[in-house]
């Protein structure tokens, strides 16, 4: 089946630094990828939709300059949290539509802790 | 606008009890998909089911069953004879198939705890 590989699974960074999260579709081409954020014991909130070769579409309230999304190829989308602060600490998950019966496939998530 | 409501925040049951997780959705579209996912403590999302809006047949898969009622915009999920391994957060989700982005909107989730 369609697999999305997400790295890193955990990252701890210092306040003010930037962190890049990668999502790769391993055995299919992902024209569109979705980025979600999940606070502890909360739901998954869609942050943005990234389309290969074009600018990402951000959901209302999500800072574009804070959360940079790049989808330069059909198999790779990246989310960069710039100048991270403790309030950015969260679980970030990517997803891609597969065109298969189950629709979407998800990465395993990245737990970001900003200290 | 599309919205998914899971009114039950937490449910606790004892093993072997049946449990139903409720999901109510709102959408402007006539063509859409509904999903259920399981999220164990490790965080990954486990796909359980996808149902399109034209298929109102109920579905059974082992101990799991789903009841789709368009008239009440509900897509409820029942676990029969629950087990400790069923303990997780369960999310209901909706995507509107007519939009190019087909983004998936999640409900707030129901945390299920099954005690031995």
Image: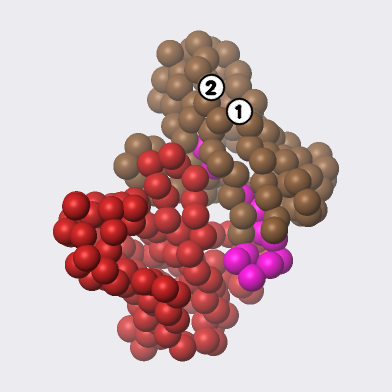
Chain colours: A brown, B red
In the image, taking residue B39 as reference, residue A76 lies left or right, namely right
Q: Residue at x 50, y 17 (%)?
A: A12
Residue B85 location in percent, x, y?
Answer: 34, 53
Identify which residue, B3 or B78, lies in the foreground.
B78
Identify which residue, B61 or A113, lies in the foreground.
B61
Q: Please report contact status of discs 1 and 2: CB closer than 8 Å, yes or no.
A: yes
Residue A69, above or below A48: above
Picture quarter with the N terminus of chain A: bottom right
| Residue range (magenta) | A92-103
Tag 1 subunit:
A
Helix, strand or loop at mark 1: loop
Helix, strand or loop at mark 2: strand
Q: Is residue A53 magenta?
A: no
In the image, taking residue A89 as reference, residue B114 lies left or right, namely left
Residue A58 location in percent, x, y?
Answer: 59, 45
Residue that label 1 marks: A8
Residue that label 2 marks: A11
Tag 2 subunit:
A
Residue A98 seen by the camera: yes
């Amino acid at each position: 089946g369609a697999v999305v590989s997400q790295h890193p699974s955990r990252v701890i960074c210092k306040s003010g630094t930037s962190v890049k999260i990668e999502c790769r579709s391993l055995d299919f081409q992902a024209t569109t990828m979705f980025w979600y954020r999940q606070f502890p014991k909360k739901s998954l909130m869609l942050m943005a939709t990234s389309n290969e070769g074009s600018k990402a579409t951000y959901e209302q309230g999500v800072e574009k300059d804070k959360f940079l999304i790049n989808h330069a190829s059909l198999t790779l989308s990246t989310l960069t949290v710039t100048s991270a602060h403790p309030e950015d600490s969260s679980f970030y998950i990517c997803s891609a539509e597969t065109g298969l019966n189950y629709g979407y496939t998800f990465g395993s998530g990245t737990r970001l802790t900003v200290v | 606008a599309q919205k998914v409501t899971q009114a039950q925040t937490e449910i606790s049951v004892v093993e072997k009890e049946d449990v139903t997780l409720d999901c109510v959705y709102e959408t402007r579209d006539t063509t859409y998909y509904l999903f259920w996912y399981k999220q164990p403590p490790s965080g990954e999302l486990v796909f359980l089911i996808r149902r399109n809006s034209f298929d109102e047949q109920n579905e059974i898969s082992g101990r799991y069953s789903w009841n789709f009622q368009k008239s009440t915009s509900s897509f409820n999920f029942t676990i029969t004879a629950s087990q400790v391994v069923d303990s997780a957060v369960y999310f209901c989700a909706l995507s509107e198939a007519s939009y190019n982005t087909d983004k998936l909107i999640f409900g707030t989730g129901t945390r299920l705890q099954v005690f031995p």
